Image (cartoon, grey):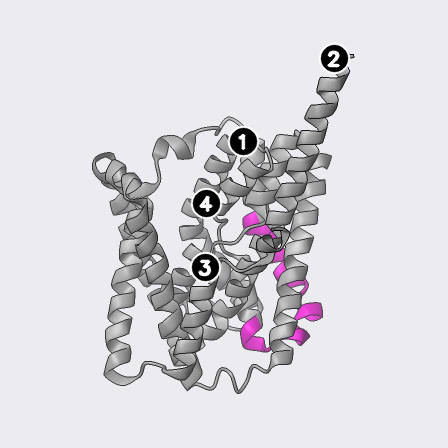
Amino acid sequence: MSLRRFLPDPFICALLATVLLASKLPCRGEAAQVFDGLTDAAIALLFFLHGAKLSRSAALAGLTNWRLHITVLISTFVLFPLMGFLLRPLLSPLVTPGLYVGVLFLCTLPSTVQSSIAFTSIARGNVSAAVCAASASSLIGILVTPLLVGVLLEAHGQGGMSWHAVESIVMQLLVPFVAGQATQRWIGGQVQRHKTLVGLVDRGSILLVVYTAFSAAVLEGLWRSTPLSVLGGLVVVDAVLLALVLLTTRYGSRALGFSREDEITIVFCGSKKSLASGIPMARVLFAAPTLGTIVLPLMMFHQIQLMACAVLARRYARKAETSSGQKSVDIAS
């Protein structure tokens, strides 16, 4: 039973299967153009549904705890990018230059929503604050992530962000999201009631992006330039970044005087990176031949963060149960 927490979830297995399919049967020519069109439509639909699903009342709940939310945003959009950039001399030799661009992209992404809230709940943290913090991170990331990508890539010597990329972000991500928010009043309930269908669109769009991205990358010689030693180095890079952020958010929140419940929220919301937002954003921001290399660090990080946070959440929960039991004994005595 204890081994199950270390097993990849079904969606990770689907991602790996999609990468294998793209490696063996990459789409090319007219088929690639058809898949590109389907992928663009799926991404627009995905962000429309995200906008329709995000309840404004839920996103605004708990905003009075502004110190917590600012701390989460700083961890997500300041601490992570700084670590990725400052650790470049130490970590970049472990991977290829293209993969480290993917690592920098990973550092700019917003937090997850579902898993951040789920782990906060398991660990007995401040769930209402987690809903607000994760939702705000996801919303702000649509605008902030592309800006950070431009800054980091320019500092990395890769050139800034083009006007075409800005236009694509607005048309493919922001406009559908705003349209979803505008219609949330009328269709939000329907979207919430059909979570399975929304989940299929969510996962389906990501799998489409992964298939087209890795198809183009494989045709450009991705696996010839990425030996197993480099993949092992990428695991180390992702694990180091996650460990440093987990430690910083944990002990930093304590130094700032946050309660145990708020500490848990900061740890889980401030250390996550969203696969659901990241892969579609990569599709908009980067050229097709480089996409496979760009999203590979994020795919690995996603699985590592799930395994590490599952263990950490259970440890927090056990400490809460022990503390609760000790208080009961003290009261009884």
Q: CB under 8 Å between callouts 3 and 2?
A: no
Mark whose residue sits in front, 3 or 4: 3
At mark 2, the secondary structure is: helix
Whole-percent x, y for residue 264 in the image:
62, 37
Mark whose residue sits in front, 2 or 4: 2
Pointer 1 or 2: first along the chain: 1
At mark 1, the secondary structure is: helix
Mark whose residue sits in front, 4 or 1: 4
Which residue matches tag 2?
332
Residue range (magenta): 76-99
Q: In this view, does 205 lie to the left or right of 86?
A: left
86 vs 114: above or below: below
Which residue matches tag 4?
114
Q: Is residue 273 left or right of residue 58?
A: right
28 and 326: which is toward the camera: 326
Pointer 1 or 3: first along the chain: 3
Number of numbered discs on residues = 4
Q: CB under 8 Å between callouts 4 and 1?
A: no
Mark 3: which amino acid? Answer: Pro
Q: In this view, does 199 lie to the left or right of 236?
A: left
Q: Residue 10 carries which label?
A: 3
Residue found at x 55% / y 65%: 300
Residue found at x 45% / y 45%: 114
